[in-house]
Amino acid sequence: MNTLLSLTDNLQSFWSNTGFANVEIGHIVMILFGLLFIFLAITKEYEPLLLIPIGFGILIGNIPFNESAGLMVGIYEEGSVFNILYQGVVQGWYPPLIFLGIGAMTDFSSLIANPKLILIGAAAQFGIFGAYIIAIEAGFAPNEAGAIGIIGGADGPTAIFTTSKLAPHLLGAVAISAYSYMALVPVIQPPFMRLLTTKKERVMKMKTPRVVSQTEKILFPIMGMLLTTFLVPSGLPLVGMLFFGNLLKESGVTRRLAETARGPLIDIVTILLGLTVGISTQATTFLKIDSLKIFIIGALSFIIATCAGIIFVKLLNLILPPEKKINPLIGNSGVSAVPDSARISQVLGLEYNPTNYLLMHAMGPNVAGVIGSAVAAGILLGFLY
């Protein structure tokens, strides 16, 4: 009899620790979100390198368990494996390493050949500061508004780095929002590009950019780092690593280091960042009204950034001579979703003029947007941190 009671107690104890016994509706909702991310990544190829780790991370993070059992499997349980890996997000270690890899794979030639394109990247940052104001009006504290606003830069690592410093409690919502809108660039941007441009503007051809010398390519990351970080020292972890990676690429004597930075290193860090960000979206911490507000403001931020870039090009064309006018379709690429937003410029350009190749021109403001979002993050950290 005692043996039977003991066995019953053991079975009851086992059952109380299963996911079935601890599941809540919020866990099911988040698991469906994770499955949606994986579905979009595989069937639509929307940022699969990001959405699959994040989506699977959401599944892991929403497996229910008995928190009082001390299993040490949750991401918020100090000392657990996932908690240790998550420190790379919370402490801001992963984003600079990703920027190192981005720098090592980025060609700044288009921007160097036509420096005025950096103004488009700067104009797109209106999305960040516009969303900051909207978030303040929505009732968020200034530091929270700064973290939410950075979503408009369409740069996941920058959003994570900024939020980890300004509002760590919003990390999950901000990161998921930023990466979601990065993945949805092909869906969100084209309607606004068509709305804000005329048929005449869409078929506009641009002059082939000049050839950039190797010396210019080497000097650019050095001068770019000095100028931007002297202006905004708080952006040093992101901007410094971005330009360092680019120097590794362009110097011609550190090919192995550049290949490591843009290959194995960025792949490993992307896996860890995406997975742990996904795991952090536990239903109990993620499914709140503030998360919904962040998604809405994040969408507005991205739309403002897209429209600001296009409108700025149209205004700039008013003072440029005919041979130097810019096709407004590349204004959308001022956001730093590289290279997706530049690719959208190319696709729409070919749609209205099959002989119009805008990709090489759109990459200028696109890489400028990467620099711009990092600088904007530094500005926000400078007066809010």
Image: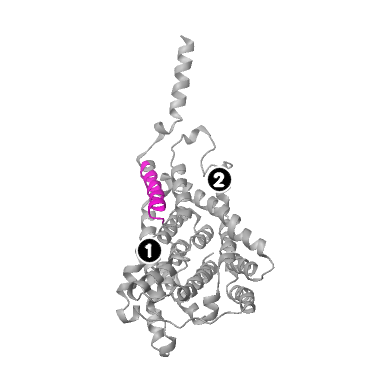
Dot 2: what SS? helix
Q: Is residue 86 above or below residue 382?
A: above
Mark 1 is on which residue type? Pro
Of residues 353 and 325, the one nearer the viewer is: 353
Q: Nearer the viewer, residue 310 or 357?
A: 357
Which color scheme does this rendered protein use? one colour
Residue 138 appears in the figure:
no
Which residue is situated farthest in the front direction here?
355
Q: In this view, does 274 lie above or below 122?
A: above
* In the image, residue 31 above or below residue 375: above
Q: Which residue is rendered at x = 37% and y = 74% of the image?
A: 349
In the rendered image, is residue 363 in sight? Answer: yes
Spot the residue most to the top. 1
Disc 1: which residue: 186
Mark sitting on residue 83: 2
Q: Confirm whether the magenta stretch covers residue 360.
A: no
Segment colored magenta: 28-45
Work out which quarter of the rendered image holds the C terminus and state it: bottom right
Instruction: Report x, y in % for residue 38.
Output: 41, 49
Locate residue 184: give its quadrant: bottom left
Mark 1 or mark 2: whose residue is earlier in sequence: 2
